[in-house]
Image (tube, rainbow, N blue to C red):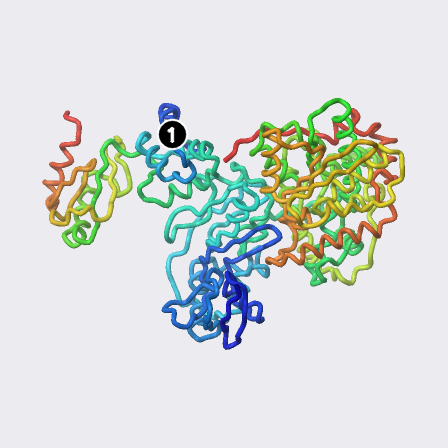
Amino acid sequence: MCDSASPNKFAQKLDDYIDSLTYKKENLIGILHYAQEIYGYLPDNVQWHIAQKLDIPSATVYGVVSFYSFFTMVPRGEHVVNICTGTACFVRGAEKLKDELENQLKIKAGETTPDNLFTLETLRCVGACGLAPVMIVDGKVHGRMHEAQAINEVLAKYRPES
Amino acid sequence: MDIQLTINDIPLTVPEGTSILDAARTVNIDIPTLCHLKLNEMHYNNNIASCRVCVVEVEGRRNLASSCSTPVASGMVVKTDSLRAIQARRAMVELLLSDHPKSCLTCAKNMDCDLRALAAELGVRAISYEGAESEFEIDQSSSSIVRDPNKCIRCRRCETMCNEVQTVGVYSAVGRGFETVVKTAFNLPLNQTACTFCGQCLAVCPTGALTELDQVDKVWKALNDPNQFVVVQTAPAVRVALGEEFDLEPGTIVTGKMVAALRRLGFDRVFDTDFAADLTIMEEATELVHRIKHGGRLPLLTSCCPAWVKFFEHQFPDLLDIPSTCKSPHEMLGVLTKSYYAKTLGIDPKTITVVSVMPCVAKKYEAARPELAQGAETADVDIVITTRELARMIREASIHFDHLKDQEFDHPLGESTGAAVIFGATGGVLEAALRTAYEVLTGETLEKVEFEALRGMDGIKEAVIPIAGRDYRIAVIHGLGNARTVLEKIQAGESNYDVIEIMACPGGCIGGGGQPYHHGNMEILKARASAIYREDRAKPLRKSHENLAIIGLYKDFLGEPYGKKAHQLLHTSYTARKKI
């Protein structure tokens, strides 16, 4: 397989979780959620391991992982920055926010910075329309992100102190 | 309960649960389909209604209904030929074509493409939609199958075949939206997956997305090389299917014409894989007797089918000791051509090219297996082409196939019995083995050589045959999903068979992935099977051990069946592989 991430570190934890389930094959999505929680992403060998454990084709697992945007097959940065592109945020400048974040982080949405600190992604409405446009860092919502300076200040909070 | 409805003003009554599509067929209305494919004999049903080509108008319903997946209802009024339905169907095909390469003229599927045929049938004269076209990498990693996902129309027929009938599970729909396409796990090249190369995916693929690796030019090169002595052999199932490529009725036996065509193409010798099928019987029967006598592991599983071999290597690596160690017949014939026959002629085996014409795409992969060779430079078989590829060569050479006069195979590796020809249909190997085993074990003549219980399209057939005071429990299996069912029983210690024949393809080799496309018509497979049994009945000799050339081969060259020399040349070993 095409990558070398070691699944061994958390393998026992994942196996215990799978073993605890009454319905295993039926719970593929739940198992993938759990695996992504412990590994941070779903490398090929983790998917393969789950396929063997559930006795289903690895192509089936891969098909499911590739379908849902929640699942990622590439490692994510320490901090995940999400831009809301729901209708309200879109109307109030989500595109501009995205451009500015791409500019400041020097990556495109969907990518991770070379120092592995930030991953930039987009998602749909988070229900904070009153604060539009919003960005979400590690689950914390930051609203009214119109100015480059404000965006920079938010990011700075997540950078290690030098 | 029966349901009454009308289709195009024709009143009809059909059983509850019937689809509109099937109901329409009962009154001779053939609604066009593309993704839909149902093959009852194989328990194959691809009914995902993804292509929307079969849409019809149902009175009182706002949108059009896909007739393949919509069951009839009482009082339903269906129009299959309304302007709206006809235009919608055409639009569906145009949408499919908008993201389809326009390379039909040079496509390997060309005249066999269901999408092309449908576009013609529906009168598509222009493609009204423009937009992005897919750009996927073409997978040519294997020696058997080429995948061109750009030609994939997401009908998922291959996926249903691979996952549900064969239970190999190599394919899945991957991604979402426009990017969705049928791929392997982790987008691995096919040669790094558990693919068995049975080729049933390409037998049902409606377009050129899945095709065999074309080896025709390699054969032409060998034939035009003055330093090469080019030997060809043909599998039993080829002679009952090749005629279809030249518009002869399915089930027409064209053995003599095929031999004549091969000579015209310029092959130096035309041998018959059937010779090696007779030889396989001698070796495999002796192996079985040896296992029984010495308390070896039972059941013995046949090993003629390379897709089945690869299947158990990936899926049942703990059972590698139960299949017979016999090489497959065409590999046996290859190695004998390069040893026994080369010695007879006094020529260097390195100057011999062995070409196999097979109903199979897995044989291409098999020929490239490194252990099926005598040293690095001398593969037992050099090139494998399918029945379809041979037909193409015959057309390329402008030979009028149906006007050819019948000719005979060359001596001695072209001699065969009726027992060998039935290898081409499911159950044939065991029937052939029983004809020999009975006479060898009892010393009596077997009067009734036909074992009807082993014939036919049932997925798993079982019989108990008493020979010389011992009951032989045997099973005949075709289709890898059926094989899995039985192997899981063996694994669990729940089976007490003595010998099992397994073929990967439904119907056996007559239904192989390299045969002329059946386009879903299973009657073609039945016609081929009955032709195989007709060919058997017409043979003067019908038991492998009566083949004089085989007797001569053991006497002059091999020594004893299952002996030292036979082991060295005719037997092989298996490798545990990863399930992916």
Residue type, mark 1 in image: Ser
Is residue A110 depicted above or below B75 in this figure?
Answer: above
- Residue ID at (45%, 31%): A53
Q: Looking at the image, which is closer to me, B227 or B399? A: B399
Q: Is residue B217 visible?
A: no
Q: Secondary structure at mark 1?
A: helix
Does residue B398 appear left or right of residue A31 in this picture? right
Local crowd size for mark 1, using a 10 Å CA cut-off: few (<14), some (14–19), many (≥20): few
Percent of width and height locating residue A145: 12, 44
Whether residue B179 is situated above or below residue B383 in the rendered picture: below
- Is the N terminus of chain A in the top left, top right, bottom left or bottom right quadrant? top left
User: Residue extending furthest bottom?
Assistant: B9
Mark 1 belongs to chain: A
- B111 vs B235: above or below: below
Image location of residue B241, percent across then percent down: 70, 55
Residue B575 figure quarter:
top right
Pointer 1 residue: A20
What x and y, as percent, mark residue B324? 70, 31
Instruction: Examine the image and state in which quarter residue A17 appears.
Output: top left
Quarter that holds the C terminus of chain A: top left
